Image (cartoon, rainbow, N blue to C red):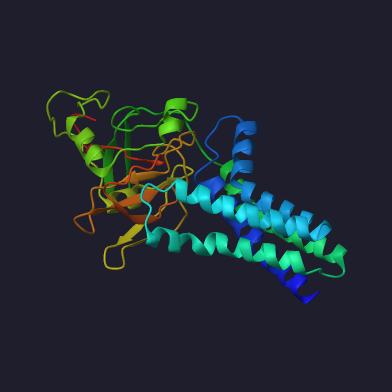
Amino acid sequence: MILGWIAVGISTLISSLWAFWGIYETFHEGWYFRSLSQNLGLSLAYLALMLVLVALSVIALRWHRAGGGLYQLFGVGFCVWILMTRRVLSPGVVLGWLPEFLPVLVLGGLFWVGRPKPVSLAYEVCVVLPLLVAIGFAVEPVTRIAGRIDDGNRALRIVQGNGVKLVWAPEGPGWPNPDPHDRTWVKQWRGPTWEEAQKACRYLTADGTALANTPQDIWRLPTVEEVVRSMTRHGTNCGGLWNPISAEASYTTKPDKESPLWNPYSPIIYWWTSSQPTSSQAYSVDFNGRVYNRNKESNLGSQGFRAVRTFRESSP
């Protein structure tokens, strides 16, 4: 009975952690479709691991040996899938992922030999707690996304406030926003590297709608401080401040994926900046204003950029 409750406790903890991860990522990386049904479908994909683990726990409580065996098969399959999707496979990569799938293998053994009693209570713990975690952590992002402001204007914009006044490039080669329905993009899931973003800014024409054959050097990547200070929410500047010593951004109001800076219906959630903490890294900022050190060779599908240029009274 003790081993059975240990299995229930571990499985509930793991599925609750995946519930938290799934909710966080679905409203961070996901929720970029205009269709509610597509957004909900994407949310289910992010919550798939939580749902699978809950289902395995329910099976293990009903048929402990069959469920224990399924847990171990799932652990092996998950391990193989993860390692097959790595671009570089090394002992370090394998050891780094061990904490992710080793507990699942252990769970299979615990459910095989353990029988928690009363079983009815074990069912409730395994099913209800992960669902409560998912629902609880969904309240804030659902409320925030429901109140997003989007004027639909993806043209060249002048954004002023918090000591910064810049011209931001229109949607196009200076502000790429791949269509989430584009199967080619979905398959490749590739964004520009830092060098590619830098080059696109250099070659961008004055109106920001095309790339010239030669460098124009009109546009550039914004600095990390410029992005932080320009962040808005509901049309109001968020009061962002950049601390170069601690390499952290702070805000009086949490930014969000809203116009005039962001496209809420784009899968792009990170922007490259021109600021470089090291020769091989550059700062990247997400729509919530968080700043990351990212390798310049990174080409995440959710990574993009938006070119800027200095505002001049004679030419917006």
The residue depicted at 56 percent of the width and 30 percent of the height is 34
One can see residue 127 in this view: no
Q: Position of residue 53 (x, y in %)?
A: 68, 54
The residue depicted at 35 percent of the width and 38 percent of the height is 191
Q: Looking at the image, which is closer to me, 179 or 57?
A: 57
Rendered image quadrant of residue 38: top right
Q: Indicate whether 302 appears above or below 280.
A: above
In this figure, what is the number of numbered marks? 0
- From the viewer's perspective, is 238 left or right of 28? left
- From the viewer's perspective, is 292 left or right of 136? left
Q: Position of residue 26 (x, y in %)?
A: 56, 45
Rendered image quadrant of residue 271: top left
Q: Looking at the image, which is closer to me, 215 or 314?
A: 215
The residue depicted at 77 percent of the width and 59 percent of the height is 65
Q: Position of residue 313 (x, y in %)?
A: 20, 34
The quarter of the rendered structure image containing the C terminus is top left
Q: Indicate whether 20 appears above or below 234.
A: below
The quarter of the rendered structure image containing the N terminus is bottom right
Q: Position of residue 246 (x, y in %)?
A: 31, 68
- From the viewer's perspective, is 76 left or right of 313? right
One can see residue 159 in this view: yes
Q: Indicate whether 18 appears above or below 26.
A: below
For this orientation, the residue located farthest to the bottom is 2
Q: Looking at the image, which is closer to me, 131 or 6?
A: 6
